[in-house]
Amino acid sequence: MEVGGVFALAAVASTISWTVTQEEIFKEVRDWGRRTLHPKLAYLLGCYFCLCHWISLGVVLLAGGPLEPGGFIGWAVAVFVVAATGNAMTAGFHVLRVTLRLLRARADLEELRRDNYGRRRRVRFDYRDRDNLSPR
């Protein structure tokens, strides 16, 4: 399995894990799991990190390719490398998303601070009230 293959499998495992654990489309499945499954299995449906390892196992088995060392060690290393790469990719995307939201919020704040003539004006916000960020 080459580096490109690892990133491709990690992207697949990461996307499936995120969709099952976080997106609204699988909310009913997670609720069903909380009602009927053992608590540890139900937790698996809500834990991105945990589910990513199991999805990585399935993806590596379907791809049929361990990393360089053969046998069980190669398969185990492949599963953990794919899971770690997927988790790192997801963490990177979240850092990027939060950074972009912060930059957008700063730009919106700067726009609110300027009056109609382009001059700066003083605006105060109550940042504790997340639902209402209108200026006072």
Image: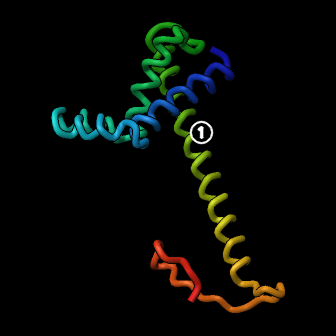
Query: What is the x, y in percent for residue 15?
Result: 52, 33
Compared to 48, does 71 lie above or below?
A: above
Q: Quadrant of the N terminus?
A: top right
Q: Percent x, y for residue 5?
A: 64, 19
Foreground pick, 50 / 130: 130
* Disc 1: which residue: 89
Mark 1 nearby-residue class (10 Å; few <14, some 14–19, many ≥20): some
Measuring from the top left, give residue 2's x and y in whole percent: 67, 17
Name which residue lies at 25% across and 37% down. Answer: 42
Q: Residue 13, how many percent across, how many down?
A: 50, 28
* Residue reaching furthest to the bottom: 122
In the picture, residue 36 is in which quadrant? top left
Q: Residue drawn 29% across and 38% down?
A: 28
User: Looking at the picture, does residue 19 appear above or below residue 107?
Assistant: above
Viewer-side residue, 26 vs 38: 26
What is the count of numbered marks? 1
Element type where label 1 sits in the image: helix
Q: Residue at x 69, y 65 (%)?
A: 103
Would residue 28 appear left or right of 114 to someone viewing this image? Answer: left
User: As displayed, is residue 48 above or below residue 97?
Assistant: above
Amino acid type of the residue tagged 1 in the rendering: Met
* Applied colour scheme: rainbow
Viewport quadrant of the C terminus: bottom right
Furthest residue in direction front, as rendered? 116
The one of 71 and 105 positioned closer to us in this rendering: 105
Looking at the image, residue 9 sits to the left or right of residue 24; the answer is right
Report the side of 125 relative to 53 (left or right): right
Residue 69 in which image quadrant: top right
Measuring 83% from the left and 87% from the top, which residue is drawn there? Answer: 117
